[in-house]
Image: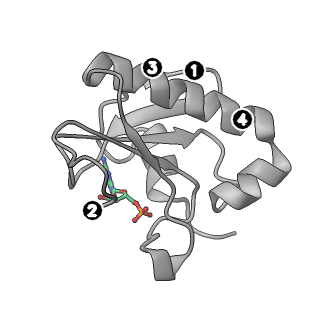
Amino acid sequence: MSEPSVFTRILRGEIPAEIIAETENVFAIRDIAPQAPVHLLVIPKTAEHRNVVELAAADPALLSELIGLANAVAAEHADGDFRLIFNTGAGAGQTVFHVHAHVLAGGLSEGSLG
Ligand code: 5GP
């Protein structure tokens, strides 16, 4: 068995983090190293999907549930406008191989991905 991911350990209460919202299968936390005024992570409770491509292929309903919770936390913690980022692969900056979406909001520059 591989080691549980940091997100699984948060879900189990082994690493402290406030769960700011959840649905049956998905939960949201604040990123420990925010890259924007609002930087939240939305994460399936299961660790079985390593990235969004695997999640979309295996369980589109769970991906839809994740996007719905991202929308809800963006409405609650920002003005409802947000970027949804799935780093996919180490070369793209993914460090935790338990699929998660970054919800970035507030103070984002217009018309750029920077
Ligand atoms: P990735 O680089 O895989 O796309 O994103 C992983 C994210 O998880 C990073 O933005 C990182 O700051 C965040 N992270 C890593 N460890 C922890 C932790 O223990 N608590 C919280 N809240 N976020 C974490």
Observer-side mark, 2 or 1, equals 2
- As measured in the structure, the alpha-carbon distance from the residue carrying label 4 to the one carrying label 2 is 29 Å
Label 1: which secondary element: loop
* In the depicted structure, whether residue 49 falls above or below residue 67: below
Q: Please give the residue where the numbered disc 2 appears in the rendered image.
A: 114
Left of 71 or right of it: where is 17?
A: left
Going by the numbered disc 2, the residue's amino acid type is Gly
Q: CA distance from mark 3 to mark 2?
A: 24 Å
Answer with mark 3 or mark 2, whichever residue precedes in sequence: 3
Few, some or many residues within 10 Å of mark 3 (<14, 14–19, 20+):
some
For disc 4, the neighbor class at 10 Å (few under 14, some 14 to 19, many from 20) is: some
Q: Secondary structure at mark 2?
A: loop
Which numbered disc flags the more N-terminal residue, 2 or 1?
1
Mark 4 or 1, nearer chain start: 1
Kindly identify which numbered label has been placed on residue 72: 3
| Left or right of 27 on screen, residue 102 | left
Tell me the element at label 3.
helix
Residue shown at 20% from the left, 48% from the top: 36
Is the residue marked by circle 1 packed among few (<14), some (14-19), or many (20+) residues within 10 Å? few
Which residue is drawn at the image coordinates 84% and 50% (left, top)? 58
Where residue 71 appears, as percent x and y from the top left, is 47, 25
Query: Are discs 4 and 1 less than 8 Å apart at CB?
Result: no
Instruction: Give the number of the mark in front: 4 or 1.
Output: 4
Residue 89 in percent (x, y) is at 56, 75
What amino acid is labelled 3 in the image?
Answer: Ala
Extreme residue in the bottom direction: 91
